[in-house]
């Protein structure tokens, strides 16, 4: 969550420290002195011209807002961590004011989550799954010695033998009640059916919730169920579930109880008991870290008993690549699976898994998850363990993925990035034009004050800013064809001179009154030519470097 928040903060953050030209460690007295000076400069009552008065009001309000935030210790702490965007989050007024930065960050994230939850309550949350099973055994079984070719040709027969479609939507009723409507349709070898379910969930407290389920279908009959979740301790929770199925064979009750406990920061232990048509006792251990995911499970049941172990390795790349493998053995036989998963776009994840089992045979499972929609394509290749089926199930998807990735995905993502960059350029140009207009307005408002400051400095041979430029400078020896992107900031800097001194903090100079950023995202510097006690001085300073003038080292030695 932090990354997205930081992106929002950077794009909506105005540097209040730079606007007031104070250090981030500035005291209350320093803030007040800078605020008073800028108020005198931008006070609307000093201007009779309607346009100048309007511009002065705008700048005066910006200065007032910056001072209000930085002069309040609680607001200043929030601003220092999250920027201007953090102050816009609802709920700060009820937060205890004496908190550490870590506590404030935690509280901000909590308020953000609550705001997102309120947004989700205003719309449905659709989820769906589409599964298409393909029988491709004719591709490999025809090479078996016992294979009897069907009359009608030598082309392999591939068919879709099963399908499953399910969909669900959520409808918030109140702040604590949610209704979920779901349904599914299935078909297998020409026979199929469907069902529809209605669930009402109530959040009873921060520690638990409960839900009631009603269902009906053309295969199993009506269903009534109850499920309860409860946090027993901060490290342990339990889930209990019971149901009644009114099937053609009579009433079929079922019950299950599951308890889980945090064994450490990354490890969970689960114990589940089920009673009903598929009675079993299952225990599992799950360890999830930043780089791996491990699961060990043991089930003892009347119909199915098994031991399963799986491991997944997570690569730390931008595509979130994962490789996984598992082995499962029980009364049904043994199954070994291996595969890979990768993010192919902002909202899409593609995975492929090869399943090799006795007596199940070889199956290739392809899965595409896009947002809340999941598409599954299990392709059954052979009922036997044929090396050729294993080879093609492994190599085939890799070759197809590489071809599609190179010919379709990469050009598509590059086109998307170019469109985004073009939009950013247009947005940046609009923002620069707006900031430029604000800076020009500020310079107009400074003219009278600058005239008085220059007269006072000249009378005592003090500090006079002759020329000042801010932006990106280009030397004669490097990048000759590139144009310099600089703005004249002589008037704004002269306006900041006080008692023959000019002090600039380490904050970016683009936030100073009368300044704007002429080259967003590029390295900038400040170049000054000034006169002090009748002697010329010159200095070049980096954008985020503090500066104090006059200095003896800036003096330009006169040629003899």
Image (cartoon, helix red, strand yellow):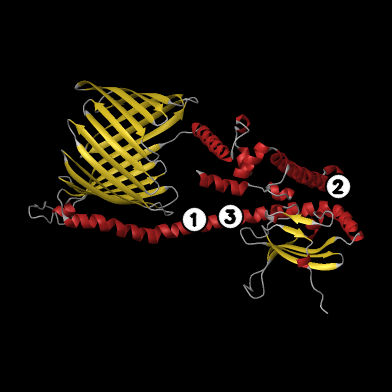
Tell me the SS state at disc 2. loop
Secondary structure, mark 1, is: helix
Q: In the current view of this chain or complex, which residue is farthest to the top?
A: 251
Vertical position of residue 358 compared to residue 220: above or below: below
Crowd around label 1: few <14 · some 14–19 · many ≥20 (10 Å): few
Q: CA distance from mark 1 to mark 3?
A: 12 Å
Tell me if mark 2 has few (under 14), some (14-19) or many (20+) residues whose alpha carbon lies within 10 angstroms of its own.
few
Q: Earlier in the sequence, mark 1 or mark 3?
A: 1
Tell me, yes or no, whether the two marked residues, 2 and 1, touch with CB atoms within 8 Å. Answer: no
* Residue tagged 3: 424
Judging depth in this view, the residue of 4 and 399 nearest the camera is 4
User: Residue at the left extreme?
Assistant: 146
Q: Is residue 300 left or right of residue 32?
A: left
**Sequence-wise, which precedes: disc 2 or disc 1?**
2
Q: Kindly check if marks 1 and 3 are in contact, taking CB atoms under 8 A apart as contact.
A: no
Q: CA distance from mark 2 to mark 3?
A: 36 Å
Residue 278, given in percent of the width and then of the height, sits at 21, 29
**Image spot of residue 102 (x, y percent):** 55, 40
**Looking at this view, is 397 or 104 the one in front?**
104
Mark count: 3
The foreground one among 310 and 382 is 310
Is 60 located above or below residue 279 in the figure?
below
Q: Which residue is mark 1?
A: 416
**Residue under pointer 2:** 49
Q: Under tag 3, what secondary structure? A: helix
Residue 171 location, quadrant:
top left
User: In x, y percent, where is residue 43?
Assistant: 82, 44
């Amino acid at each position: 969550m932090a990354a997205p928040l930081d992106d929002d903060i950077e794009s909506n953050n105005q540097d209040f420290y730079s606007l007031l030209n104070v250090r981030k460690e500035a005291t209350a007295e320093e803030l007040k002195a800078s605020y008073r000076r800028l108020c005198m400069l931008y006070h609307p009552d000093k201007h009779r011209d309607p346009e100048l008065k309007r511009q002065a009001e705008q700048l005066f309000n910006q200065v007032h807002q910056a001072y209000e935030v930085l002069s309040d210790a609680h607001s200043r702490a929030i601003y220092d961590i999250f920027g201007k965007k953090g102050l816009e989050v609802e709920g700060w007024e009820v937060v205890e004011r004496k908190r550490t930065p870590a506590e404030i960050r935690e509280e901000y994230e909590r308020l953000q989550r609550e705001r997102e939850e309120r947004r989700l309550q205003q719309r449905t949350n659709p989820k769906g799954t589409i599964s298409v099973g393909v029988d491709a055994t004719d591709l490999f079984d025809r090479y078996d010695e016992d294979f009897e070719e069907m009359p009608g040709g030598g082309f392999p027969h591939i068919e879709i033998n099963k399908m499953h479609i399910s969909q669900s939507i959520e409808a918030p009723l109140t702040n604590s009640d949610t209704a979920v409507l779901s349904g599914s349709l299935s078909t297998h070898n020409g026979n199929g059916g469907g069902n529809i379910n209605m669930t009402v969930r109530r959040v009873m407290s921060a520690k638990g919730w409960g839900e009631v389920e009603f269902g009906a279908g053309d295969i199993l009959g009506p269903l009534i169920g109850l499920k309860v979740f409860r946090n027993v301790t901060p490290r342990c929770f339990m889930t209990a579930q019971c149901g009644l199925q009114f099937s053609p064979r009579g009433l079929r009750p079922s019950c299950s109880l599951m308890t889980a406990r945090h064994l450490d920061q990354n490890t969970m232990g689960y114990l589940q008991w089920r009673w009903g048509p598929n009675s079993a006792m299952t225990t599992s251990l799950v360890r999830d870290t930043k780089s791996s995911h491990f699961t060990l499970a043991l089930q003892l049941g009347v119909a199915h008993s098994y031991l399963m172990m799986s491991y997944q390795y997570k690569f730390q790349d931008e595509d979130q690549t994962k490789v996984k493998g598992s082995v499962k053995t029980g009364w049904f036989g043994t199954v070994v699976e291996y595969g890979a998963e990768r993010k192919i776009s902002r909202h899409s994840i593609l995975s492929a898994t090869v399943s090799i089992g006795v007596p199940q045979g070889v199956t290739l499972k392809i899965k595409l998850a896009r947002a809340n929609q999941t598409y599954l394509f299990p392709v059954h290749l052979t009922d036997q363990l044929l090396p050729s089926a294993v080879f093609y199930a492994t190599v085939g998807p890799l070759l197809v993925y590489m071809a599609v990735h190179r010919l379709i995905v990469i050009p598509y993502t590059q086109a998307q990035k170019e469109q985004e960059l073009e939009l950013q350029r247009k947005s940046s140009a609009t923002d620069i034009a707006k900031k430029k207009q604000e800076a020009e307005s500020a310079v107009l408002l400074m003219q009278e004050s600058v005239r008085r400051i220059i007269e006072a400095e000249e009378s005592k041979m003090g500090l006079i800013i002759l020329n000042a430029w801010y932006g990106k400078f280009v030397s004669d020896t490097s990048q000759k064809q590139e144009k310099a992107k600089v703005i004249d900031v002589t008037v704004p800097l002269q306006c900041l001179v006080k008692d023959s001194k000019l002090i600039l903090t380490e904050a970016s100079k683009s936030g100073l009154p009368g300044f704007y950023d002429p080259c967003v995202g590029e390295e900038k510097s400040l170049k000054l030519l000034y006169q002090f006690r009748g002697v010329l001085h010159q200095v070049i300073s980096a954008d985020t470097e503090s500066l104090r003038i006059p200095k003896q080292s800036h003096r330009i030695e006169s040629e003899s």
